[in-house]
Image (cartoon, rainbow, N blue to C red):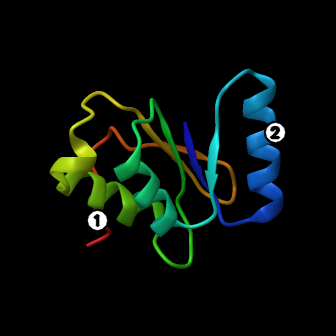
Amino acid sequence: MVLSEDDETLGALTEHQLKRQYHVVDWMKDGRKAKEALAARRYDIYVLDWMMPDMTGLELVRKISRSEALFRRSGVPIVGYNQIRRYISASQPIRSNT
């Protein structure tokens, strides 16, 4: 799985907990690196921080859904979480605040 998290403490803790459960984790510390990783390799799941300074998880999900190369992996779950650890499923329709 790819883990995209810019916070060092939360990223290290999340990576550690996932690896303890025998997951293979590639931790990317920003959205742009996560996008590059997704383009270069197939992942079974994407775990994305919703609030990153360079590219938010929402922006990354939108780029993935608009890119034929990134979206060719149909059925890949995309899970995002914010700083208060509330889980958001990206499989739900993306709604704007307007």
Q: Position of residue 24 (x, y in %)?
A: 64, 31
Q: Position of residue 62 (x, y in %)?
A: 28, 59
Q: Relative to residue 64, is residue 54 depicted above or below?
A: below
Q: Is residue 51 left or right of residue 19?
A: left
Q: Residue at x 38, y 44 (%)?
A: 90
Q: Residue furthest bottom?
A: 53
Q: Which residue is mark 2?
A: 16
**Residue corresponding to mark 1:** 96
Residue 94 x %, y %: 29, 53
Image quadrant containing the N terminus: top right
The type of residue carrying mark 1 is Ser
Left or right of 70? Residue 46 is right
- Mark 1 lies on a secondary structure that is loop
Image quadrant where one finds the C terminus: bottom left
Q: Which residue corresponds to the image point at 64% horizontal and 59% vertical from the top-left?
A: 5
Label 2 sits on a secondary structure element that is helix
- The vertical placement of 51 against 46, above or below, is below
- Identity of the residue furthest to the front in this view: 40
